[in-house]
Image (tube, rainbow, N blue to C red):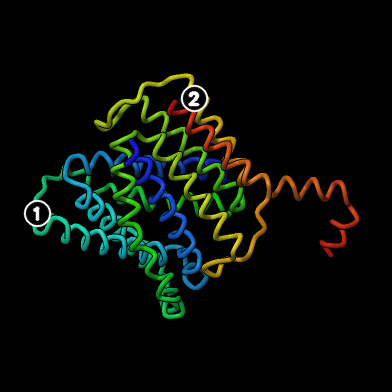
Amino acid sequence: MKGILFALLGGFFLTFQSVANAAISKEIGSWQAATMTQLTGFVLAILIVLIIRDRSYRQLNQVSPLYASGGMLAAVVLFSNMTAVHIMGVTLTISIFLIAQLVLAIVIDSRGWFDMSLKKIGRTQILGVLMMVVGVIILKW
Amino acid sequence: MALGIFLAIIGGAFVCLQNTFNANVKKQVSVWTTTALVLFLGFAASLAAGLIFEGANLFSFQAEPWFWFSGIVGVGVVACVTQGVQLLGPSRAISLVMVSQIFFGLMWDTLGWFGLEKVPFTWQSLLGILLISGGVLLFQLGPILEQKRFMRLHPDVAKASNE
């Protein structure tokens, strides 16, 4: 039960983040909004690391530089998210984001790219993505 | 419209890439160190992009006070999703996160809070997001259900594979 609440709240925060970023970027510009939210988020995260005396950063040198630099992708993610929300609203933006996310996940998992464990893709997963695409078409018809 | 769809596809693909890369970082360091690193690099990349596209104009803006607290939401995401995954396992937790995202999206479009343009609620859009949610559940939980059915139909194989 507690897990369900956390997951639902996590989804709420994700949507809230899209909405807040889109609203802020409308007022002060997209790159300003992206820079600002990432900076304040970082400050809070580093405070948490300090408070819980998390020393695991010492193992950071064992992480491949490619994976460690993944955070930079957020610039593209945030810019496209804010712009897409302005153009077509929150629901459609989130839905297409999720479809693209899951389709690429299928490709990565089925080939075992980026050190991901190789997974066989089931029929239910293909069917699930197709259902989502139909849903988006109905949403926008 | 076409630009919006294009950007959402690119953005979604980048989210997946980032999740994949982050998963590899988390094999070595904790969730919060990963989060701090990811947000710092996101900040640095956004700052660089902003300077390239807008130069010094990047810093001429009038922020309302609440703008400075928006980053906290991202930390809330990490905290809640991590807890959810720990308690429910990744498939169940992520499917709920995604479904919740879509429903709150519809709510927000309908209410048009924060000065975003209102997208009027229609029963058709509800049908659309019900299908999308169904698709998410099928995608995330399908493999678990298939495995369970297989074990029920072939209890001996299932028993052997557990041993």
Q: Secondary structure at mark 2?
A: helix
Residues at circles 1 and 2 in contact by the CB criterion of under 8 Å: no
Give the residue at the far top of this rendering: B123
Give me the residue at 37% from left, 61% from top: A48
Q: Which mark is residue B126?
A: 2
Give me the residue at 50% from left, 28% from top: B128
User: On the image, numbered disc 1 is attached to which residue?
Assistant: B57
Q: Position of residue B22 (x, y in %)?
A: 46, 64
Q: Position of residue B66 (x, y in %)?
A: 22, 43
- Compared across the picture, whether B63 is left or right of B142 comes to left
Q: Which mark is residue A1?
A: none
To which quarter of the image does residue A132 belong?
Answer: top right
Give, as a three-letter code, the residue at label 1: Asn
Q: Secondary structure at mark 1?
A: helix
Q: Position of residue B41 (x, y in %)?
A: 31, 65
To which quarter of the image does residue B109 belong?
Answer: top left
Whether A57 is drawn above or below A90: the answer is below
Quadrant (top left, top right, bottom left, bottom right) of the C terminus of chain A:
top left
Depth check: B64 or A62 in front?
Answer: A62
To which quarter of the image does residue B106 belong?
Answer: top left
Give, as a three-letter code, the residue at label 2: Leu
Whether A85 is drawn above or below B151: the answer is above
How packed mark 2 is, by other alpha carbons closer than 10 Å (few <14, some 14-19, many 20 or more), is some
Give the residue at the far front of this rendering: B2
Quadrant (top left, top right, bottom left, bottom right) of the N terminus of chain A:
top right
Earlier in the chain: of badge 1 and badge 2, it is 1
Q: Chain of mark 2?
A: B
Q: Position of residue A139 (x, y in %)?
A: 46, 28
Image mark count: 2
How packed mark 1 is, by other alpha carbons closer than 10 Å (few <14, some 14-19, many 20 or more), is few
